[in-house]
Image: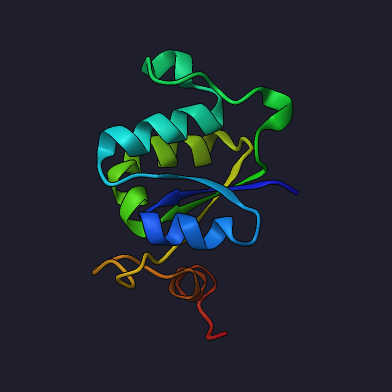
Amino acid sequence: MKYFVIGERELVLAFGLVGVEGAVAVNRTEALDAFNRVTGQASLGGGAASIPSEQRPKVLILTEEVSVLLEEEVLKWQKDGQYPLIVEIPGMQGHVAGKKSLTDAIREAIGIQV
């Protein structure tokens, strides 16, 4: 299964050490350009060319900071239920204040502690 990560430089470099491709994004423009390339929507954004569909990753890893920058796009993508599957991870600075962790979301959804 192919993965792709979008986040800060150090995190992208770390994932690169284990063979995961990625793109560094420190602002909304860079994050949106990378997101559009990976999801095949680059022609809509006017940035770099899209990754061909057969080479697209099945899992897109976003740092929480990038996810906040792309909140509307990520939510729309997740609602459409398309690949790549989007997974959020904390960035180098830890969790973003006020952002629910996956465990918190599960607890809220099912009403029990895991």
Residue 53 in the figure: left or right of residue 86: right
Q: Is residue 96 above or below residue 26?
A: below
Q: Is residue 69 above or below residue 48?
A: below
- What colour scheme has been applied to the protein in the rendered image? rainbow
Q: Is residue 110 above or below residue 49?
A: below
Quadrant of the image containing the C terminus: bottom right
Q: Is residue 41 above or below residue 15?
A: above
Residue found at x 37% / y 14%: 46
Residue found at x 42% / y 41%: 75
Q: Nearer the viewer, residue 21 or 44?
A: 21
Residue found at x 33% / y 43%: 71
Q: State the image coordinates of residue 73 (x, y, percent, origin top left).
A: 39, 35
Q: Name the outermost residue toward the bottom.
A: 113
Residue 79 in the figure: left or right of residue 64: right
Q: State the image coordinates of residue 26 (x, y, percent, origin top left).
A: 28, 47
Q: Nearer the viewer, residue 74 or 19?
A: 19
Query: How many circles with numbers are drawn on the protein?
Result: 0
Q: State the image coordinates of residue 81 (x, y, percent, origin top left).
A: 60, 38
Residue found at x 31% / y 65%: 99
Q: State the image coordinates of residue 17 (x, y, percent, origin top left).
A: 59, 61
Q: Identify the image quadrant of residue 8.
A: bottom left
